[in-house]
Image (cartoon, rainbow, N blue to C red):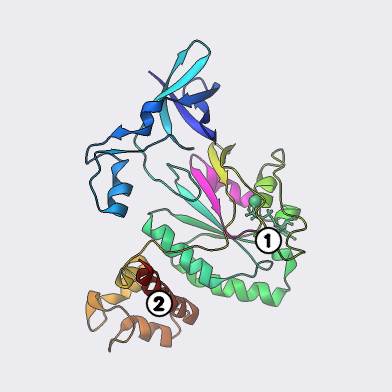
Amino acid sequence: MKTGFIIKQISNQYTLKDIDTETILIAQARGKFRYMKLDESSSFNKNVTARTKKEPKTIMVSPKVGDYVNYEIDGDQVWITNIKPRKSELERPDVVNVDQVLLVFSCVRPDFSFYLLDKFLVILNQQHLPPVIVVSKIDLVDDATLKNIQEGMAYYETLGYEVYYVNSKQRIGIDVLAHIFKHKITVLAGQTGVGKSTLLNALMPKLNLKTQEISFALGRGKHTTRHTELYLYNEGYIVDTPGFSKITFNLYYPDQLRLLYPDFIKLSATCRFNHRCIHLHEPGCAVKEAVENGEIPISRYENYCAFIEEIKQQKLKF
Ligand SMILES: Nc1nc2c(ncn2[C@@H]2O[C@H](COP(=O)(O)OP(=O)(O)OP(=O)(O)O)[C@@H](O)[C@H]2O)c(=O)[nH]1
Ligand SMILES: [Mg+2]
């Protein structure tokens, strides 16, 4: 049976790469994909049951970028006949089997934000997707501002996150990034205008992706990147995505949040109420103590408190 890997999708037209011959084919999905019978252990089942808390017997599944599929050739038509189990699935962007997320933050335009950083880290932790952090536009700030950001980032490096600093326009700090993409599917994520496409162009000059030129000067921040496609780079694939202006948690209970903070989890064993402590108003909280001692950045703790409120507000809307 022939197996292909989907690298691009435009409505029902899929660009496949045969995994043995590396031949590129344009394929379509047969109608029967619309409804798939699932057993409980199916990898397609997890997301649906978690979200809807139901056990659907049939659900709509269609092939997505990043899928491994079986296909057959029938005359001049190529048909996708089966989708292989997925190891991860993102909704925005619509990509499956992602290995890591490259989180891009710019020093300015838009301003660097520890609030967004903490939010992204929570969301990715929940999805079991490891992040790599890139700080862009280092050429657009003075030394003191850059030093401030670097000092703030030092804490995150102690948590084990890799942090890279780049000036994509002059290709500074780009080559040291190359190794992180090897044998992986990496998705670029970040606010609109932070320089995701510019970074990709710096990595792959032949790509010549469209980037923003005037919209930020006009202060409008429109999206420049529109569709989803995988680009082969250093034996891995990179996905450029449209930026966003707002992201929300997929959490319904505020007390789930603390379980997505690896640094808080470590400390919670020494909280007076141990693992029941939600690090807000409890006496003898080791997390709050660490914030007071300067071991955890105040901003990280303040963002945590703000997120708790956001999740409560989100819950009210349901
Ligand atoms: N000086 C400088 N400018 C940069 C750098 N990276 C990106 N830019 C500029 O920032 C603007 C936005 O860059 P894009 O690459 O289009 O941003 P994006 O994240 O892809 O935006 P969306 O596609 O809308 O999500 C462009 O004008 C880039 O030239 C950098 O490192 N230094
Ligand atoms: Mg872009």
Query: Which quadrant does the C terminus fall into?
Result: bottom left
Amino acid type of the residue that numbered disc 1 sits on in the rendered structure: Gly
**Farthest front residue in view:** 317
Locate residue 279, reporting x and y percent: 33, 80
Tell me which corner region of the image, top left, top right, bottom left or bottom right, holds residue 230: top right
Residue 218 magenta-highlighted: no
Asked if residue 120 lies left or right of residue 175, the reply is left
Residue 180 magenta-highlighted: yes
**Camera-nearest residue between 301 and 215:** 215
**Neighbourhood count class around disc 2 (C-alpha, 10 Å): few under 14, some 14–19, many 20 upward:** few
**Camera-nearest residue between 155 and 45:** 45
Give above or below for 2 relative to 188: above
Give above or below for 123 relative to 69: below
**Camera-nearest residue between 287 and 110:** 110
- Residue drawn at x 39%, y 59% as measured from the top left: 125
Amino acid type of the residue that numbered disc 2 sits on in the rendered structure: Glu
> Residues in magenta?
173-192
Locate residue 212, reporting x and y percent: 72, 54
Tell me which corner region of the image, top left, top right, bottom left or bottom right, holds residue 231: top right
* Residue 160 shows in the view: no
The residue that disc 2 covers is: 309
Q: Is mark 1 within 8 Å of ligand 1?
A: yes
* Residue 295 shows in the view: yes
- Residue drawn at x 53%, y 13% as measured from the top left: 76
**Neighbourhood count class around disc 1 (C-alpha, 10 Å): few under 14, some 14–19, many 20 upward:** many
Locate residue 106, reporting x and y percent: 64, 64
Kindly report the distance in space between the C-alpha atoms of the residues bearing marks 1 and 2. 28 Å
Give above or below for 174 relative to 118: above
